[in-house]
Image (tube, grey):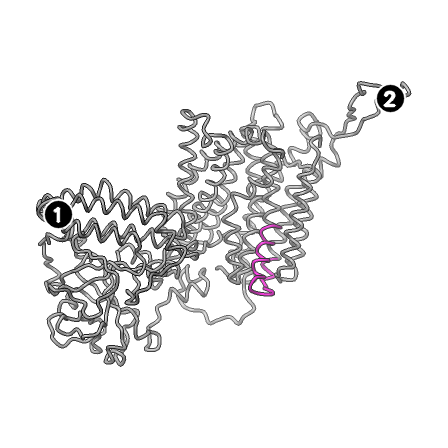
């Protein structure tokens, strides 16, 4: 699907399908590194910045809380010890680790123990496995656990919820918004949860003891957190629920702009935050995440539907952002803004976006090729679209009425005493007063506006139904047809299908030190990391197949009963015993790491998933919610654009040509550049062409229809009407840009030279719009 993108279906987003993403795995693994016995300080700018910005005052607050706890009788010193160690850890957490003492007791998983450890904190009796989800503690057990805390525990949790938790959440939120500090955001959030669940079982260490993984009471030590770096530049690619973190962080701007315009503006009219420039800028920025979420919703719904339904949904919601914005602008008397935005969108789709894609593709490859046949279909539709939108303009330019306009006599005469009154020129009449426009051009315009959407749907039928094999077939030999292929198997590209297919692991596929998951009765899933150089008998054992089900709790508990246990039993591939305290060697062999359940969800493997991240219900909820929010944002934009233009030297049309045409499509530019960098120039080129076709075949007819409806039984005013009569420079720019793109398509090759030509052509045409005289 991503290699040969059928016309009319939405562009697949990079994070549309569930898959194991390397940046998410790296973010999670950076919190669960193996403790180092070397006395390094791990000094680097990011770690030092953490201490200077957050570490010192967090450590000071926790130390003050520990002083308060130390004077509390009965177990107050235990809480004070944890808080003092926490203060030192927050000051410099790098190279240090957090351990927890747990007790694994053999029991029947069908009858989980309801006992509550007094040290475990508030809700320790909750288990993390599926059995725990069905056996949550009753209200009586919860009350009993709270009463067992005693005075020191009650005061600890009061200080925790009032002081410690809000500060840790604040730091976690700030680090999340900074993007590059994602590990520290997750570290503070996970640490917060452990301090809530089992504070007295936590210990903060500088380096591992190296002799035993059991404490004096015989409980195994679990490594909860261990990190070495605070900053990573690669985390701009981090995704949550298939959504890039950059767009997640931009989403709060939407709600702040609405609150700013409707509430703060009334009470703080003179503040910088409520100034028209600030509201306008924030409103433009809020368009970016809304357009991204709408695009994700459209792609997700289409992936779970047939091709026809997907094409209809894409045609309906693919341009909803622009249609809402332009409709609100027309109701506000901004027809020049709408005209400039539509022309700017066409120029950006056929010149700027393909140019950026080709230059990005040239970073890694000298030249890339794309399907000339599919490009031919797109080029033909583009030419037809230009004919449809420019025919009324050319018709009116040739047959419209002209009138003689004179500027009048100057106030002073020349030196000879003769008055000069010859400054006259011919120009076309106002279309609303021209009988040719009213009687001939308007009916032609309505016919063209009705034909353009039919061209779009004819292209859908041609590309997706009748000639799908002829248009989208590749030059490679056709593979034997597989029986009973699902819809996703027909649509998904090979590189996604390869991840979605189960591959049994072989001995050479699994490293000897590969992590083997172990399910325990603790609150988090445990992973046993083996150091095989100290366990020579494990190297000859067969690896655990990647498709095998995880071991059950009963299997783990049965393994603890034996005295001579090994890391792996070749006779039972699902059997993974826990190493008992009597079998531990004298040298350090393992670290048992614990992960939060949320981390396991983020790091979900791709095997077995052939559906998008979002369900249909979630996708439609996002679609309608973002559409509603954008209608509010569009109204704010149009209200503030006049006040902003008073302080700018550009006119209304040029503002639409640049800002209003480019900002809603930033996500498409990012997708196109990303695909081009990864060698998929076909999809990058299709993104621009598909958007230009949507502007010509859907958005422009929609604006003509909206103008007809809005001005029905009203006196037609030019600034409240959008017509298919464009100025001459607009016509020349669109014709030249489409001609250049179709000529580029002919060879089926893409390189940085052609991309540079397209971008420079865009700059020349936009410069022409900037220097249009105001009188024109």
| Residue 330 drawn at (x, y percent) | 55, 31
At 28% from the left edge and 68% from the top edge, which residue is drawn?
515
Residue 101 seen by the camera: yes
At 10% from the left edge and 71% from the top edge, which residue is drawn?
561
The residue stretch that appears in magenta? 351-375
| Residue 352 drawn at (x, y percent) | 60, 50
Residue identifier under label 2: 414
Front residue of 204 and 369: 204
Q: Is residue 642 above or below residue 341?
A: above
| Residue 429 drawn at (x, y percent) | 72, 28
Helix, strand or loop: magenta stretch: helix
Question: Which of the two labelled residues, at mark 1 and mark 2, occupies the earlier sequence position?
Answer: 1
Query: Is 371 inside the magenta-drawn segment?
Result: yes
Dot 1, how many residues are within 10 Å of its Cα: few (below 14), some (14-19), or many (20+)? many
At 47% from the left edge and 51% from the top edge, which residue is drawn?
308
Residue 288 relative to residue 651: left or right: left
Residue 205 relative to residue 743: left or right: left
Front residue of 505 and 773: 773
User: How many numbered marks, from 0 up?
Assistant: 2
Q: Quadrant of the C terminus?
A: top right
Residue 139 seen by the camera: no
Q: Is residue 113 above or below residue 710?
A: below
Nearest-to-viewer mark from 1 and 2: 1
Residue identifier under label 1: 76
Residue 732 relative to residue 703: left or right: right
Return the residue found at the far right. 416
């Amino acid at each position: 699907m991503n290699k040969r993108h059928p016309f009319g279906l939405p562009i697949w987003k990079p994070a549309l399908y569930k898959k194991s993403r390397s940046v998410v795995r790296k973010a999670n693994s950076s919190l669960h590194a193996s403790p180092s016995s070397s006395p390094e300080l791990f000094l680097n700018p990011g770690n030092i910045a953490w201490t200077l910005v957050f570490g010192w005052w967090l450590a000071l607050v926790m130390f003050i809380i520990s002083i308060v706890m130390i004077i509390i009788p009965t177990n107050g010193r235990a809480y004070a010890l944890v808080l003092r160690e926490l203060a030192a850890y927050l000051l410099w957490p790098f190279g240090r680790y957090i351990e927890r003492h747990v007790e694994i007791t053999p029991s029947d998983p069908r009858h989980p123990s309801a006992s509550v450890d007094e040290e475990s904190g508030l809700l320790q009796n909750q288990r993390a496995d599926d059995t725990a989800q069905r056996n949550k503690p009753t209200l009586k057990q919860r009350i009993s656990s709270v009463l067992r805390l005693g005075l020191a525990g009650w005061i600890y949790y009061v200080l925790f919820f009032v002081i410690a938790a809000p500060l840790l959440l604040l730091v976690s939120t700030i680090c999340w918004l900074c993007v590059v500090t994602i590990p520290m955001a997750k570290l503070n959030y996970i640490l917060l949860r452990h301090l809530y669940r089992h504070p007295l079982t936590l210990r903060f260490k500088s380096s591992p003891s190296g002799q035993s993984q059991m404490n004096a009471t015989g409980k195994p030590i679990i490594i909860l957190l261990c990190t070495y770096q605070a900053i990573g530049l690669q985390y701009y690619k981090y995704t949550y629920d298939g959504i890039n973190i950059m767009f997640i962080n931009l989403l709060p701007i939407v709600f702040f702009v609405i609150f700013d315009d409707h509430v703060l503006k009334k009470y703080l009219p003179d503040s910088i935050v409520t100034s028209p420039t600030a509201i306008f800028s924030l409103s433009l920025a809020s368009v970016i995440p809304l357009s991204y979420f709408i695009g994700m919703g459209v792609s997700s719904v289409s992936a779970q539907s047939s091709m026809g339904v997907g094409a209809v949904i894409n045609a309906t919601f693919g341009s909803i952002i622009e249609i809402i914005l332009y409709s609100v602008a027309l109701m506000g008397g901004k027809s020049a803004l709408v005209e400039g935005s539509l022309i700017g969108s066409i120029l950006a789709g056929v010149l700027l976006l393909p140019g950026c894609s080709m230059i990005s593709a040239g970073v890694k490859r000298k030249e890339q090729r794309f399907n000339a046949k599919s490009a031919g279909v797109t080029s033909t539709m583009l030419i037809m679209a230009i004919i449809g939108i420019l025919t009324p303009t050319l018709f009116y330019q040739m047959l419209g009425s002209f009138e003689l306009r004179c500027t009048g006599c100057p106030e002073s005469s020349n030196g000879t005493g003769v008055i000069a009154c010859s400054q006259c020129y011919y120009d076309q009449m106002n279309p609303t007063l021209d009988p040719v426009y009213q009687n001939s051009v308007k009916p032609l315009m309505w016919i063209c506006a009705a034909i353009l959407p039919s061209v779009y749907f004819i292209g859908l039928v041609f590309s997706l139904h009748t000639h799908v094999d002829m248009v989208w077939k590749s030059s490679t030999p056709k593979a034997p047809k597989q029986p009973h292929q699902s819809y996703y198997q027909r649509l998904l590209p090979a590189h996604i299908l390869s991840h979605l297919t189960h591959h049994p692991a072989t001995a050479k596929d699994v490293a000897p030190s590969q992590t083997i998951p172990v399910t325990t009765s603790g609150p988090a899933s445990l992973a046993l990391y083996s150091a095989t150089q100290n366990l020579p008998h494990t190297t000859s054992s067969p690896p655990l197949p990647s498709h095998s089900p995880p071991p059950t709790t009963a299997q783990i508990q049965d393994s603890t009963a034996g005295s001579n246990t090994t890391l792996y039993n070749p006779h039972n591939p699902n059997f993974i015993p826990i190493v008992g305290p009597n079998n531990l060697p004298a040298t350090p062999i393992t670290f048992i790491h614990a992960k939060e359940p949320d981390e396991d969800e983020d790091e979900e493997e791709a095997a077995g998933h052939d559906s998008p991240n979002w369900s249909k219900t979630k996708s439609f909820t996002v679609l309608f919610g973002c559409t509603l929010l954008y209608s509010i944002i569009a109204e704010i934009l149009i209200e503030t654009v006049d006040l902003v233009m008073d302080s700018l030297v550009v006119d209304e049309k040029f503002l639409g040509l640049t800002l209003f045409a480019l900002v809603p499509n930033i996500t498409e530019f990012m997708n196109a550049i990303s695909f081009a960098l990864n060698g998929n120039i076909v999809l990058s080129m299709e993104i621009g062409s598909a958007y230009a076709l949507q502007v010509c075949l859907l958005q422009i007819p929609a604006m003509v229809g909206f103008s007809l409806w809005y001005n029905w039984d009203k006196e037609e005013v030019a600034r409240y009407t959008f017509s298919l009569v464009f100025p001459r420079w607009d016509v020349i720019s669109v014709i030249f840009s489409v001609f250049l793109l179709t000529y580029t398509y002919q060879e089926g090759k893409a390189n940085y030279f052609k991309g540079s030509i397209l971008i420079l052509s865009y700059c020349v045409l936009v410069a022409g719009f900037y220097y249009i005289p105001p009188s024109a």
